[in-house]
Amino acid sequence: MGATGYTGPGNFTGYTGYTGRTGYTGYTGPTGYTGPGGATGYTGYTGPSTRAICFTMGSPTNTSALTTSEIQYIVCPFACTIGAWNISVDAGTCTVKFAKVGTGTALPTIASNSINTSGVSISTGTTIHSTTLTDFTTTSITANDIIGCFVTAVATAKFINVVLQVG
């Protein structure tokens, strides 16, 4: 075999030529069918629409009747509106009044903070429910109001349960 000849200088390439123009893209077409919509999901439990503020004084096992000095206070942790009231007694009759003040102040008194005029009462039977609120001067309760329940008249009852239904 013979000797290999001279290869010449390196790193040279030839002319590649003109690239040319890009072609036409074409029509896109209509949007396709999306299919039927599904049913909406369950929204979940929203909680009770009615709540209760309860006052209990005395006991059915008491040996003597309650007096007009009975008072109970409760701080209501939520804003609400009184919609009805209930009174249950073991026997006899009873009238109660309500008072309220904002939290951080002294306890309410019926002399200066009353929210009803004559009071609500039970005169027959042992339980009454009423949505009549005409005796109330306001039915609005602000969150954290202190509410007092005052027995203003009582006969024979040894036990009183008072409920304000609120929403």
Image (cartoon, rainbow, N blue to C red):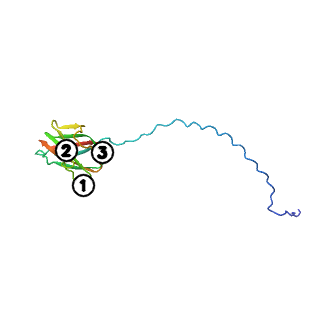
Q: What amino acid is at disc 1?
A: Thr
Q: Are marks 1 and 3 in contact (CB under 8 Å)?
A: no
Q: What amino acid is at disc 3?
A: Cys
Disc nearer the start of the sequence (1/3): 3
The image's mark for residue 80 is 3
Q: Residue at x 20, y 37 (%)?
A: 128
Q: Residue at x 24, y 55 (%)?
A: 105
Identify the residue under disc 2: 97
Identify the residue under disc 1: 105
| 10 Å crowding of disc 3: few (<14), some (14-19), many (20+) | some
Residue 164 placement: quadrant: top left
Q: In this orientation, does residue 164 appear?
A: yes
Q: Position of residue 24 (x, y in %)?
A: 71, 43
The residue at the far right in this view is: 2
Q: Residue at x 83, y 64 (%)?
A: 9
Q: Position of residue 81 (x, y in %)?
A: 29, 43
Q: What amino acid is at disc 2?
A: Lys
Tag count in the figure?
3
